[in-house]
Image: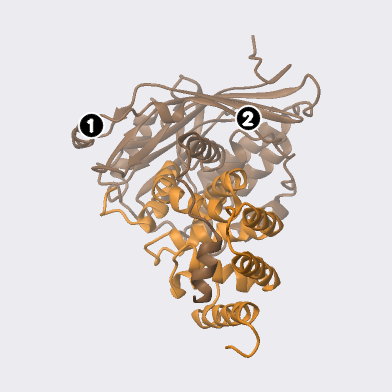
């Protein structure tokens, strides 16, 4: 990768040389695919990751060129696509839970089930912020870019999400 | 354990993407780039005349404040009149598939190693049927725009420049164009779509207008309306009579893009109003660092015809 060419430069260039956008794919496909696969499993992740870059190409004129790194923008597009797959994600998490190796303590299984239930109970926008933070390692500012919301909103969503999960997982009176 | 750690534990680390999955996704993106990202313009042999013209034109501010070029407007209205005289193609249906063949090359910048740019010619054949279509592409001999580009390609280990543009891609069904044939309505629509673009409304209108002309199943009346709109766009200038890369006679109009220092040219068939070719050349001051008049992109539309089935070629 040529360190001289930022994502912003490549995206700007792709407005007149569309094939320059392929370099954005080369740089970030693995990260976007990894996030999608972690959440949705192989087949849906492929579909989501592929569609993310196609949509990103279509919308490249709207990319904020003052942002050097395209990753938050791409994760934002991916997040929008994944939102409609939450039921798939939930089923997958429950299936993974059932595949826990023999000997896994009942308490641990119960806690995982509670965690899935807690995630399920979160409003979609809180869940999205939480998963971008926990699984995609985006900063608050990057999540704000990804979801097109102010940083303060990201903070409050993450705070609320953590709080709800904590309450779900910790027995009453222990917090 | 903190809630975040528990969430991370819940989702197992994924294995890396399989190479074939990555390739499928890349092909899907390239297909979209080929279909919708086409902003290049074609530059012909006769384009030498255009390139020469570009070479002596300073990078002036042709913007929304620019005037209507009366010569360009007259030529475009003539093209509109010719387009209106044409019979529409029959609607897509069983046994009626739109076939378009074109040859193009446009600047492809490699940024993974030492950055270099190259023109890779592509032959594109598309079929659009009532239930979907097909895109078949093949590539020709890459052409470096400068010795420096070639040296950087060698230094990068001579990556294969031809493999990316070869393949067969299924195309989604192409929706029937909903462009209005009323010129005022079409002007307003294009203006609304272009408003706010960083390079200015007029230039973006011209670019969008080109998008509607190429490889689309628009009717002659819609094409005529597009030319009528072009006649009203400030900054569109007349280049004059030219020959396209395969020797067909046409008339050329152009728009300069100071944002990157290029001139975008459309070559139109005087007899039918059909778009024959496009090209993009550099102006004196350009972001690419090439001399004025350098051809950095071109397309030539060779055949547009109805065939019986996806995959069939005209005789």
- Distance (Cα) linking label 2 and label 1: 33 Å
- Residue for point 38% across, 52% down: A10
Is disc 1 surrounded by few (<14), some (14 to 19) or many (20+) residues within 10 Å?
few
Q: Chain of mark 1?
A: B
- Of marks 2 and 1, which one's residue comes earlier in the chain? 1
Relative to B9, say whether B221 is above or below. Answer: above
Tell how many labels: 2
- Position of residue B88 in the picture relative to residue B38 (left or right): right
> Residue pushed farthest bottom?
A173
Quadrant (top left, top right, bottom left, bottom right) of the C terminus of chain B: top right
Colour-to-chain, brown:
B
Q: Camera-side residue: A70 or A102? A: A102
Q: Camera-side residue: B52 or B2? A: B2
Residue B170 disc label: 2
- Horizontal and vertical percent position of residue A78: 56, 56
- Residue for point 68% across, 73% down: A123
Q: Which residue is mark 1?
A: B157
Q: Are marks 2 and 1 in contact (CB under 8 Å)?
A: no
Q: Camera-side residue: A138 or B268? A: A138
Colour-to-chain, orange:
A
- Horizontal and vertical percent position of residue B261: 34, 50
Q: Chain of mark 2?
A: B
């Amino acid at each position: 990768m040529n360190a001289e060419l930022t994502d912003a430069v490549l995206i700007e260039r792709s407005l007149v040389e569309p094939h320059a956008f392929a370099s954005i794919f080369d740089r970030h496909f693995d990260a976007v695919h990894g996030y999608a696969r972690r959440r949705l499993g192989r087949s849906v992740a492929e579909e989501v990751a592929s569609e993310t870059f196609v949509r990103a190409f279509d919308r490249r004129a709207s990319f904020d060129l003052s942002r050097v790194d395209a990753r938050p923008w791409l994760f934002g597009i991916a997040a929008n696509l994944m939102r409609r797959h939450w039921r798939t994600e939930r089923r997958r998490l429950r299936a993974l839970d059932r595949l826990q190796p023999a000997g896994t303590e009942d308490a641990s299984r119960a806690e995982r089930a509670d965690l899935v239930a807690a995630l399920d109970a979160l409003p979609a926008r809180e869940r999205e912020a939480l998963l971008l933070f926990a699984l995609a390692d985006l900063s608050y500012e990057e999540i704000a870019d990804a979801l097109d919301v102010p940083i303060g909103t990201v903070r409050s969503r993450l705070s609320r999400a953590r709080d709800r999960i904590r309450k779900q997982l910790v027995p009453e009176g222990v917090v | 354990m903190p809630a975040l750690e528990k969430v991370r534990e819940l989702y197992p680390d994924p294995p890396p993407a399989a190479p074939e999955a990555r390739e499928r996704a890349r092909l899907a993106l390239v297909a979209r780039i080929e279909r919708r990202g086409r902003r290049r313009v074609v530059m012909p042999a006769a384009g030498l005349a255009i390139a020469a013209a570009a070479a002596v034109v300073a990078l002036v501010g042709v913007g929304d404040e620019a005037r209507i070029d009366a010569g360009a407007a007259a030529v475009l209205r003539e093209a509109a009149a010719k387009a209106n005289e044409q019979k529409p193609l029959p609607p897509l249906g069983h046994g009626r598939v739109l076939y378009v063949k074109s040859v193009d090359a446009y600047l492809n910048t490699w940024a993974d190693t030492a950055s270099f740019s190259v023109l890779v010619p592509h032959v594109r054949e598309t079929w659009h049927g009532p239930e979907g279509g097909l895109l078949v592409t093949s590539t020709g001999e890459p052409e470096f725009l400068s010795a420096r580009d070639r040296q950087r390609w060698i230094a990068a280990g001579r990556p294969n420049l031809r493999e990316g543009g070869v393949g067969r891609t299924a195309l989604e069904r192409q929706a029937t164009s909903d462009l209005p044939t009323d010129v005022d309505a079409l002007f307003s629509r294009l203006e609304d779509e272009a408003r706010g673009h960083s390079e200015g409304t007029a230039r973006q209108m011209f670019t969008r207008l080109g998008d509607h002309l190429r490889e689309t199943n628009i009717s002659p009346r819609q094409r005529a309306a597009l030319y009528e709109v072009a006649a009203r766009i400030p900054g569109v200038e007349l280049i004059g009579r030219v020959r396209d890369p395969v020797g067909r006679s046409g008339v050329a109009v152009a728009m300069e893009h100071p944002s990157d220092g290029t001139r975008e040219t459309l070559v139109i068939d005087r007899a039918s109003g059909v778009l024959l070719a496009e090209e993009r050349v550099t102006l004196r001051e350009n972001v690419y660092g090439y001399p004025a008049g350098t051809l950095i992109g071109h397309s030539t539309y060779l055949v547009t015809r109805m065939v019986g089935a996806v995959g069939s070629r005209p005789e």
